[in-house]
Image: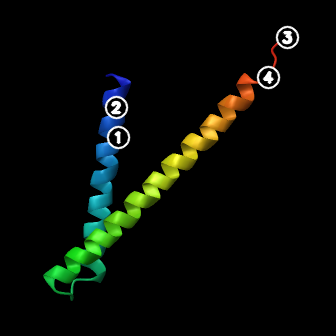
Amino acid sequence: MHSETKHELLGALQYFLIGIIAEGSVIRWFDKNTGGEQMMIWIVIAFTLTVLRIVILFYAAWFRGAEWRSISRRRWD
């Protein structure tokens, strides 16, 4: 399987899990609210998890990039 395909499948799985977590949270803790309120709560939870995912990916890429830059600057004489 190509690395691009793996990357897309892992991204889809992550967003699927974000949706499942948001839905489970709404069902468990906000089941007394009306349908519109539940939908807004679901959107807020999913948006927050998505932003958290993006921040984690950003910092992981930044740390990985800093690590490779430090190694590439070394002189291997």
**The C terminus appears in which quarter of the rendering?**
top right
Q: Which mark is residue 10?
A: 1
Q: Residues within 10 Å of mark 4 (few under 14, many from 20)?
A: few
Q: Compare marks 2 and 4 and give the one earlier in the sequence.
A: 2
What distance separates the C-alpha of mark 3 from that of mark 2?
A: 37 Å
Q: Compare marks 3 and 2 and give the one earlier in the sequence.
A: 2
Of circles 2 and 4, which is in front? Answer: 4
What distance separates the C-alpha of mark 1 from that of mark 4?
A: 34 Å
Q: Say what amino acid the circle numbered 2 marks.
A: Lys
In the image, is 58 to the left or to the right of 15?
right
Q: Residue at x 36, y 34 (%)?
A: 7
Q: Is residue 3 above or below residue 64?
A: above
Residue denoted by label 3: 77
**The N terminus appears in which quarter of the rendering?**
top left
What distance separates the C-alpha of mark 1 from that of mark 3?
A: 40 Å
Q: Say what amino acid the circle numbered 4 marks.
A: Arg
* Image position, residue 72 (x, y; %): 71, 23
Residue denoted by label 4: 74
Q: Quadrant of residue 19?
A: bottom left
Q: Which mark is residue 6?
A: 2
Q: Say what amino acid the circle numbered 3 marks.
A: Asp
Q: Residue at x 57, y 48 (%)?
A: 59
Q: Is residue 43 above or below residue 19?
A: below
Q: Are marks 1 and 4 in contact (CB under 8 Å)?
A: no
Q: Is residue 1 above or below residue 28?
A: above
In the image, is 74 to the left or to the right of 1?
right
> What secondary structure is found at the residue carrying circle 2?
helix
Q: Say what amino acid the circle numbered 1 marks.
A: Leu
